[in-house]
Image (spheres, helix red, strand yellow):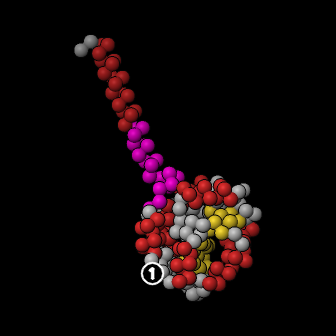
């Protein structure tokens, strides 16, 4: 084989290697939460959540909605959920860690949604349009309360940090988790430990 043929073959091999690496990276990026792929379709989520107690079914009926009313509305909702475990997740459309943990909330809120109430707080988003675009990309089986000022989120989570998750068990005992959830398994374990007291 002459030197020119060797050079062409080496260049072709290098190109194939780069193509393979690029395809592998593309495949990996498709599975990240930032691509907006929900773990369940809307129909699957509705089927899995059907038969929920009335107070939880009322949340599911408002799936992916952005609600107004601030602290009084959220307190009224929490009063209606008395006796049920509750998980409140504070998020924002601009928050990259929120994007990274949202798939865990999408999945666990469906798997545990017949026993546990899930509620979101969209905190310190400059416009409802940004929040609604986030919810279109990352649909949730529960509603979120719009909190442009951040006051609602800070009051409920005792923190200006985002994301923050607050757990209430059926007796009202509270646990606050600062920061994102790295996996579905970790979120589900904390739901069982702090909300379901298992």
> In the shown orientation, is residue 186 left or right of residue 124?
left
Pinpoint residue 4: horizontal percent, then vertical percent: 32, 13
Pinpoint residue 61: horizontal percent, then vertical percent: 54, 74
Q: Residue at x 39, y 42 (%)?
A: 24
Quadrant for residue 122, please give it: bottom right
Pinpoint residue 52: horizontal percent, then vertical percent: 48, 80
The image shows residue 139, relative to residue 118, as above or below, that is above
Q: Nearer the viewer, residue 78 or 51?
A: 51
The image shows residue 83, relative to residue 188, as above or below, that is below
The image shows residue 142, relative to residue 33, as above or below, that is below
The chief SS type of the magenta part is: helix
Q: Residue at x 60, y 67 (%)?
A: 65
Quadrant for residue 120, please give it: bottom right
Could you tell me if residue 147 is visible in this image?
yes
Where does the magenta region start and end?
21-39
Q: Residue at x 56, y 78 (%)?
A: 58
Q: Does residue 50 show up magenta in the picture? A: no
Number of residues whose C-alpha sits closer than 10 Å to that of mark 1, classed few (under 14), some (14–19) or many (20 or more): few
Q: Nearer the viewer, residue 54 or 175?
A: 54
Find numbered disc 1 in the image and state the secondary structure of the residue it sits on: loop
Pinpoint residue 162: horizontal percent, then vertical percent: 65, 62
Q: Nearer the viewer, residue 29 or 181?
A: 29
Report the number of numbered marks.
1
Quadrant for residue 98, please give it: bottom right
Q: Quadrant of the N terminus?
A: top left
Could you tell me if residue 153 is visible in this image?
no
> In the shown orientation, is residue 157 left or right of residue 17?
right
> In the shown orientation, is residue 31 left or right of residue 175?
left
Q: Label 1: which residue? A: 51
Q: Residue at x 49, y 61 (%)?
A: 103
């Amino acid at each position: 084989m002459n030197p020119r043929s060797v050079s062409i073959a080496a260049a072709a091999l290098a190109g194939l290697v780069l193509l393979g690496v690029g395809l592998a990276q593309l495949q990996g990026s498709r599975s990240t939460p930032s691509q907006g792929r929900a773990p369940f379709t809307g129909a699957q989520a509705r089927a899995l959540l059907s038969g929920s107690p009335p107070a939880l079914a009322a949340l599911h009926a408002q799936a992916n909605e952005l609600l107004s009313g601030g602290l009084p509305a959220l307190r009224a909702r929490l009063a209606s959920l008395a006796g049920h475990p509750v998980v409140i997740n504070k998020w924002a459309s601009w928050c990259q860690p929120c994007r990274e943990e949202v798939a865990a909330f999408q999945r666990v809120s469906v798997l545990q949604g017949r026993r546990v109430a899930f509620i979101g707080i969209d905190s310190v988003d400059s416009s409802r349009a940004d929040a609604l675009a986030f919810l279109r990309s990352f649909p949730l089986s529960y509603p979120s309360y719009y909190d442009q000022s951040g006051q609602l989120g800070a009051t409920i989570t005792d923190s200006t940090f985002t994301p923050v998750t607050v757990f209430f068990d059926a007796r009202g005992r509270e646990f606050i988790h600062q920061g994102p959830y790295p996996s579905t398994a970790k979120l589900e374990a904390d739901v069982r430990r702090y909300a379901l007291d298992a």
